[in-house]
Image (cartoon, rainbow, N blue to C red):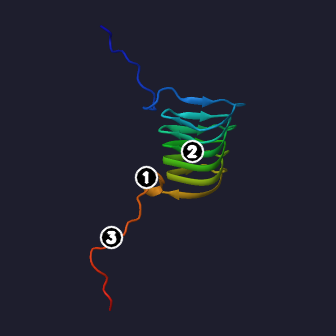
Amino acid sequence: MFSDNKKPRPMNEFGGQPNRIEKNTKIKGDITSEADFRIDGKLEGNVKTSGKVVIGKDGYIKGKVECVNADIEGKFNGELMVTDLLALKASAVIEGTVSVSKLAVEPGATFNAACTMGKGASMASSPKMETKSNEPAKAS
């Protein structure tokens, strides 16, 4: 019989090993994963993950990013949707639209974005407006 000596899972409970795009690497295309991502190179496209996205100091993303948490030191241009915490370091440069539950910004960060915050900020899960009529309108 096999023993059940498993190593503890990393902080990201979903997808195992984090993915990394190294400096001097350029990628065009869309990425979908359950694991964390660290981008130190350049990505033109979309990223969707149930983990964390980290853009390193030399990293750059142009496109749409959907994730649970994000730490940004580099540059981002596009649509950023973070369901929990977005942390912007002093060297971060953000342009576009941002939807986030919680935001932390270090002094020195450049944040030129239209921002929606709060529990209803996630565009994917925002409730639709409904009008209900329980009784007829009364004219006076």
Q: Residue at x 57, y 53 (%)?
A: 98
Calculate the distance from the C-alpha at mark 1 to the C-alpha at mark 3: 21 Å
Percent position of residue 105, x then y: 58, 50
Calculate the distance from the C-alpha at mark 2 to the C-alpha at mark 1: 15 Å
Name the residue furthest top.
Answer: 1
Q: Provide the residue designation for mark 2.
A: 65
Of 125 and 9, nearer the camera is 125
Name the residue furthest right.
Answer: 24
**Label 1 is placed on what type of residue?**
Ser
User: Which quadrant is the N terminus positioned in?
Assistant: top left
**Label 3 is placed on what type of residue?**
Lys
Question: Secondary structure beneath disc 3?
Answer: loop
Of 80 and 132, nearer the camera is 132
First in sequence, mark 2 or 1: give its number: 2
Q: Residue at x 59, y 38 (%)?
A: 30
Mark 1 residue crowding within 10 angstroms, few (<14) / some (14–19) / many (20+): few
**Label 2 is placed on what type of residue?**
Val
| In this picture, residue 93 sits left or right of residue 102 | right
Q: Residue at x 36, y 69 (%)?
A: 131
Q: Nearer the viewer, mark 2 or mark 3?
A: 3
Q: Quadrant of residue 44?
A: top right
Q: Provide the residue designation for mark 3.
A: 132
| In this picture, residue 30 sits left or right of residue 123 | right
Q: Quadrant of residue 26?
A: top right
Verify CB contact (< 8 Å) between mark 2 and mark 1. no
Question: Secondary structure beneath disc 1?
Answer: loop
Mark 3 residue crowding within 10 angstroms, few (<14) / some (14–19) / many (20+): few
Q: Which numbered tag is attached to residue 125? A: 1
Percent position of residue 121, x then y: 48, 56
Question: Secondary structure beneath disc 2?
Answer: strand
